[in-house]
Each structure stands twice: as structure tokens, then as C-alpha cells.
């Protein structure tokens, strides 16, 4: 029921917005060059509702809300891949897409993906300008026996580079862990006034989130270095029941010093159900209380479930929202779009080379599910999803595959180098190959979606 009552409406809403932005990019650039747009459609198939503007463009919403198109004068079909064979007058020739110079056609094709990237950039700039950019120091707490500990890193070290990627904040470490695992990675870190080098091998982790999504990532065995201050409690917290309060600084657990927040699980993880003496500092006053950790279920990196003791306390956040002026917010927006672009192409390359499982490819069902899940996080969740999907839609369409915008640009690049376009036969062959690739990709993604949905239902 959630698929139809929550996920599907948000999916249609988000997809319609992003498709409109993409197609309007094509349309706007085309109009700047005086090209006549015959149809601007959101969706495919039979028209549901529409109107014709004073320029002769038919704006319409069609029955299948899984895309859209702009059909320019002289196009043979909605893909704008080949010219129509219907005769055009001299005036129509001047306003037809395929009679335009090469640079104009390339600009029109590029307008769609750039519109999506620009849209994401504008939204991100607004977020960073009004709310600030999330920033967490890259100073780490090292987990005992984890990859970082084995590589010689210690709690309090500051990671400054992983592989060839510079690290300026903890969020950069999280992005790195999403993309890489299993292979040795050079690491540069600062300890006091010294900069040290090492090599770390991220271990492979696979877990399932609360929505049933399988998440695969590398694990360096590090956490944010957070003071052991109670920031809040989860439901049924034994620590809260024992009298601890938000703001308490945890000093010792059964006589063992609590050096940082992520040290707590190491001290109590195997002591579920055993009373423990917790020493704390509350506004300068030292106190003690007895807490019995509750047994919770957890999943290790291999996906194996185990029982662990928890106090069910949340840390006080060390993430700050750094304010920016307009120029600074724009710079942060550019970095964020570039970071998402790099992650997309890297992960796609990993899938194509079998370094990452192909079942991570998702289609309409999984996107709809993500839209519904984002709605539970309020407008921030929807906004984050819109930004991410806008970037993905833009850069996916730039892939040099016939039928996609990148395929058209590749043909125009050939035309620019050779001084003549590809033959119609070669173009038609390219379209068939592109159609096969795109449909094949869609079938794999949809098959993955169905498997994922069936797994959730069983």
C-alpha cells in the first residue's frame, strides 16, 4: 500500500519536476537560436491535457510519467536523432533544428543536462547560503583492531588525504568509504605537528537499513572524535532510566576511563544485562549511577547478526553548519555537485568492471521507494533527493551512448573533426545499439527493483 499511497505520488512529483527542468533546458537554448519547438511533453504516450502557445508549441502532459521530450521543427521523432523527410519551406528551414550550425545543435543538446546540474547547484547554493554547509573535523577516533588501528593510526590523528583525495572534513572520509574497499590505500595523517604516511585496507561491509535497502561500503575502522557527552536518548534508554541527563559528561564505566563517545560500545558491548557503575560530570559535580546495558541486535560487516549491550544514548553533535556569503556558498555548491558527479561516474565504472555488484543499479521502483522514504524526513529529505537525482539525471544523460544527449554530442564531435556528419545508416545503427543498451540497462535495473521489492515482502 505504501508504494501507491506514499512512494508513487512523491516519485511522480519529483520526476515531473526534474524532467521539466531537463527538457526546459533544451527548449530554452533552442529558442535562443530561433529554433521552433513543436511539442514540449512531460511524459510519453497519449496526451492527457495540453495547450498551444502563441509560438505554436504544444505544451502537454502525457499518460506515462516516466520522462519527457521536446520535439523541434524538422525532427523525425521525439528523440531528435534524425531529420524528418517531410518537405519544409525556406522559412521553416531557418527555424528547423537540423538546419542549424553545429555549435547551435550541440548547445541545444547540452542545454538539458546543464539545466539539471545548474538546478542542483542553485538549490545547494541556497542551502549553503541560508543554512550553512555541514562541517565535521577530520580528527578521528580509532576502533580497536580495525583497519586504521592495524595501519598504525591512533585516536586523535587527523586524516588529511586518502589515496589521491584530499580530506578537509569527516564527510570526505564518509564519501571515500562509500566508494572503496578491499584494496590498499595510501593515507596521509597529522599527529601533533608531524605529518605521517601509511597504508590502509578498507574492509568490505554490507548492511541493511531500516527501509530494507542493502548498503555496501568500505570501513576504515574510524569514527568521529566526539567527547563522551550525552546529547540525548533513544527510546527505552537504560541510561535515562538510571538518572543520566542530556549534557552529562561520562567519565568512567566500571572504573575504565571513557576517552571519547565511540569508546562506549567497546566498554559495554559484551556486558548486556550486567549492572555497570557509570561516573559522570554534571555541571562540575561528579556523580555515579548504576546502569544495566540493554541487549540490542546489531549487524557486523559480514552481515552477521549479533547481540550487543547498549546504553541507548546519543552523542552531542560535533557537526557545525559553516555560514557562507554568496560567493562562498556558490563555491560550496560547485564542490558538492562535482563531488556527486565524481561519485556517480566512479561507482558506475565499478559496476561495469564488476568491482561493485550490478544489483546496485536501481530503476523506477527503487527511485519511487527512495522518494517515499525521503518524505519521512520532511522537506529536507525531499530537497536532498531532488538535488541528488537532478545531478544524476544530468550526468547520466552526458554518457556517450546513442539515444542519450551524450550520444548526440559524440556524433557532433565526429562531425566537427571530420567536417561532415555520420551517414544516416551509421546514425541509425548507432541508435539501434544505443536503444539496446538503454533498454538492457532499464531491464536490469527493473529486475533488481523487483527482486528488492519481493525480498521486502517475504
Image (cartoon, helix red, strand yellow):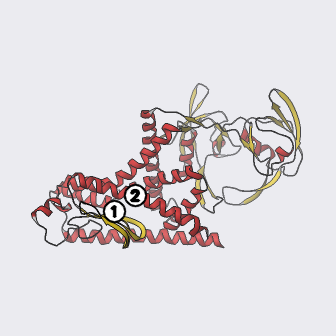
Looking at the image, which is closer to me, 188 or 329?
Answer: 329
Q: Which residue is mark 2?
A: 396
Q: Which residue is mark 1?
A: 404
Image position of 381 (left or right of 274): left
Give the answer, above or below, for where 440 lies relative to 97.
Answer: below
Residue 247 position, x and y percent, is 76, 35
The count of marks equals 2
Image position of 433 (left or right of 16): left
Quarter residue 196 falls in: top right
Image position of 405 (left or right of 165): left
Earlier in the chain: of badge 2 and badge 1, it is: 2
Give neighbour class at mark 1: few <14, some 14-19, many 20+ (Cα, 10 Å): many
Looking at the image, which is closer to me, 56 or 106?
Answer: 56
Label 2 – label 1 distance at C-alpha: 8 Å
Residue 2 position, x and y percent, is 61, 67
Q: Secondary structure at mark 2?
A: helix
Looking at the image, which is closer to me, 9 or 427?
Answer: 9
Q: Kindly identify the residue that appears in the image at 26 percent across and 66 percent down.
A: 81
Amino acid at each position: 500500500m505504501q508504494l501507491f499511497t506514499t512512494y508513487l505520488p512523491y516519485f511522480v512529483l519529483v520526476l515531473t519536476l526534474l524532467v521539466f527542468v531537463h527538457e526546459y533546458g533544451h527548449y530554452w537554448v533552442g529558442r535562443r537560436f530561433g529554433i521552433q519547438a513543436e511539442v514540449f511533453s512531460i511524459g510519453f504516450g497519449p496526451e492527457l491535457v495540453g495547450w498551444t502557445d502563441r509560438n505554436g508549441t504544444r505544451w502537454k502532459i502525457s499518460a506515462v510519467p516516466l520522462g519527457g521530450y521536446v520535439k523541434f521543427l524538422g525532427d523525425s521523432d521525439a528523440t531528435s536523432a534524425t531529420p524528418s523527410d517531410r518537405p519544409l519551406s525556406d522559412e521553416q528551414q531557418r527555424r528547423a533544428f537540423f538546419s542549424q550550425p553545429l555549435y547551435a545543435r550541440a548547445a541545444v543538446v547540452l542545454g538539458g543536462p546543464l539545466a539539471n546540474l545548474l538546478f542542483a547547484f542553485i538549490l545547494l547554493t541556497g542551502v549553503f547560503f541560508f543554512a550553512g554547509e555541514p562541517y565535521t573535523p577530520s580528527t578521528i577516533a580509532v576502533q580497536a583492531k580495525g583497519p586504521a588501528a592495524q595501519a598504525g593510526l591512533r585516536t586523535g590523528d587527523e586524516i588529511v588525504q586518502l589515496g589521491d583525495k584530499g580530506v578537509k572534513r569527516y564527510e570526505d572520509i564518509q564519501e571515500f568509504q562509500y566508494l572503496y574497499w578491499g584494496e590498499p590505500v595510501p593515507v596521509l595523517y597529522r599527529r601533533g605537528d608531524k605529518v605521517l604516511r601509511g597504508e590502509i585496507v578498507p574492509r568490505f561491509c554490507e548492511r541493511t537499513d531500516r527501509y530494507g535497502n542493502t548498503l555496501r561500503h568500505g570501513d576504515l575502522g574510524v569514527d568521529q572524535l566526539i567527547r563522551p557527552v550525552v546529547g540525548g536518548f533513544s527510546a527505552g534508554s537504560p541510561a535515562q532510566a538510571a538518572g543520566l541527563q542530556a549534557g552529562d559528561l561520562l567519565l568512567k564505566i566500571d572504573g575504565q576511563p571513557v576517552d571519547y563517545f565511540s569508546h562506549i560500545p567497546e566498554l559495554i558491548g559484551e556486558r548486556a544485562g550486567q549492572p555497570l557503575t557509570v561516573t559522570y560530570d554534571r555541571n562540575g559535580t561528579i556523580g555515579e549511577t548504576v546502569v544495566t546495558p540493554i541487549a540490542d541486535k546489531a549487524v557486523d560487516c559480514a552481515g552477521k547478526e549479533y547481540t550487543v549491550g547498549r546504553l541507548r544514548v546519543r552523542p552531542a553533535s560535533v557537526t557545525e553548519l559553516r555560514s557562507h556569503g554568496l560567493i562562498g556558498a556558490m563555491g560550496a555548491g560547485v564542490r558538492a555537485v562535482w563531488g556527486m558527479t565524481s561519485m556517480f561516474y566512479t561507482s558506475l565504472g565499478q559496476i561495469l568492471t564488476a568491482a561493485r555488484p550490478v544489483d546496485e543499479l536501481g530503476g523506477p521502483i527503487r527511485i519511487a521507494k527512495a522518494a517515499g522514504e525521503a518524505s519521512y524526513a520532511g522537506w529536507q529529505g525531499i530537497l536532498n533527493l531532488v538535488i541528488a537525482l537532478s545531478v544524476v539525471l544530468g550526468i547520466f544523460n552526458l554518457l556517450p551512448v546513442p539515444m542519450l544527449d551524450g550520444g548526440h554530442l559524440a556524433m557532433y564531435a565526429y562531425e566537427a573533426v571530420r567536417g561532415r556528419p555520420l551517414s544516416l545508416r551509421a546514425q541509425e545503427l548507432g541508435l539501434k545499439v544505443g536503444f539496446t543498451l538503454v533498454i538492457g540497462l532499464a531491464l536490469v535495473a527493473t529486475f533488481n527493483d523487483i527482486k528488492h521489492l519481493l525480498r521486502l515482502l517475504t
